[in-house]
Amino acid sequence: MNNKLAQILTIVFQPLLVPLYGLTLLFAVPQFYGFNIWAKIAVIVVCAAIMVVLPVIFYSLLIRLKVITTPQASDRKQRIWAYLFTLVCYACTAWFLFKFNSFVVSKVVLMAFFALLAVTLINFFWKISAHATGISGLLGASLYISFAYGVYNPALIVVLILCCGLVCSARLQLNAHTPMQLFAGILLGFSFMFICPLLL
């Protein structure tokens, strides 16, 4: 893998964008508000605005104010404010989904909140891969949704596993993380987004 491809993968699977991919996949789940396409669109648009658009705007503002000096926020200490703001957004989204009786998806977002909280706390002492956490979390959430709704798509799971491998390879290629930081991110993301929701 060359550096250009690694940079493209890093941008496409930026952790702030990953929830958007997960929300988009909900369109394929018939049990998510049945076949009421307008209800799906309304809920997903609101969730996308809170979980993706607001954090991206805040992140861009931090870059503009020089709080974050590189688009990738290579310095772990510079990520704290972005993490804290995103945590608030995730909590608001979980509450919104709960109020609209989307209990399964609300649980997934709540687990994403706790996964990000863990990343934030770890980040004070050690650099863990948010990219690995995000993409493995998307894989775990997709598996959990499959179990919860009884909708299985082996092709999707295979694609997400491949994406997980590609993203981690890209981060290694760019010397952004060590293998241990990537492994820790994968373990954390998958555990919170698949194992924890099943246990709860």
Image: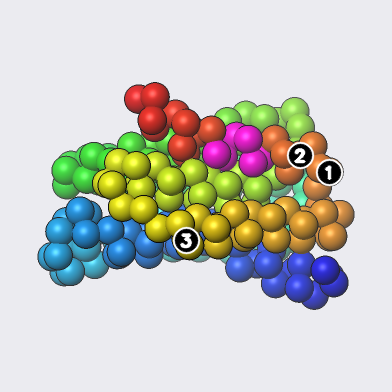
Counting from the top left corner in percent of width and height, residue 142 is at 43, 50
Please give the range of residues in magenta: 185-190
Nearer to us: label 3 or label 2: 3
Give the spatial CA distance, label 1 vs label 2.
Answer: 5 Å
Q: Amino acid at mark 3?
A: Leu
Residue that numbered label 3 is attached to: 156
Residue 19 makes an appearance in the image = yes
Disc 3 packing (10 Å; few <14; some 14–19; many ≥20) = some
Determine which residue is flagged by label 2: 181
Disc 1: which residue: 178
Which quadrant holds the N terminus?
bottom right
Q: Amino acid at mark 2?
A: Gln
Question: Is residue 88 something that shows in the picture?
Answer: no
Give the structural element (helix, strand or loop) at label 2: helix
Please give the name of the residue rendered at 62% of the width and 29% of the height, measured from the top-left corner.
121
User: Disc 3 versus disc 2: distance between alpha carbons?
Assistant: 26 Å
* Quarter of the figure with residue 28: bottom left
Q: Is residue 131 above or below residue 194?
A: below
**What residue is at 58 percent from the left and 31 percent from the top?**
118
Q: Is the residue under label 2 in contact with that under label 1 (CB below 8 Å)?
A: yes
Residue 197 rendering spot, x and y as whole percentages: 39, 32
- Tell me whether the residue at label 1 lies in contact with that at label 3, contact meaning CB atoms closer than 8 angstroms: no
Query: Which corner quadrant of the image does residue 77 belong to?
Result: top right
The CA span between labels 1 and 3 is 28 Å
> Vertical placement of 6 versus 29: above or below?
below
